Amino acid sequence: MKKNDLILIGSVLVAALLFFIGYRVIYHKDGSYVIVTVDGMQKASFPLSEDTTYTIKGANHGTNLLVIKNGSALIREANCPDNLCVKQKSIKKEGETLVCLPHKVIVSISSSDPSDHSELDGVAN
């Protein structure tokens, strides 16, 4: 490799790093609400700013313990066989999710009030 090749590779890496940091700062904002869905149906929503604990009753007689604390949410306990949902890191940014596939549970972060969301999606009658 020549000196110019190394300069080109270094420039591309620096540009990619700056793009990644800019994307995270601009588009990855803190959320305001935690939305709990089970088997595609919204079951509960909570403000991310209030500390709370909620037991999610999932599919197949499953339970997941959702903990919202210090502006982030995580699943602390679950009775699913693999406990992958418990091993996921806490979430607080808009669009982040926690998923428990055996119980069909999705916990997601949103910046808008879930009560403003309509029951209909983009393909309404």
Image (cartoon, grey):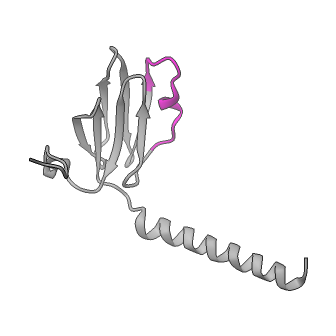
56 shown above or below 74: above
Magenta span includes 97: no
78 shown above or below 43: above
Q: Which quadrant would residue 107 be assigned to in this image?
A: top left
Between residues 121 and 86, which one lies in front from this camera angle? Answer: 121
Residue at the extreme bottom: 4
Residue at the extreme top: 61
Query: In this orientation, does residue 53 appear?
Result: yes
Residue drawn at x 90%, y 81% is: 2
Q: Position of residue 23 (x, y in %)?
A: 49, 68
Q: Position of residue 48 (x, y in %)?
A: 31, 48
Point out the stretch of residues depicted in magenta: 77-90
Query: In this orientation, does residue 74 appear?
Result: no
Residue drawn at x 42%, y 29% is: 100
Residue drawn at x 14%, y 46% is: 120
Q: Is residue 101 left or right of residue 16?
A: left
12 shown above or below 33: below
Q: Is residue 56 left or right of residue 117?
A: right
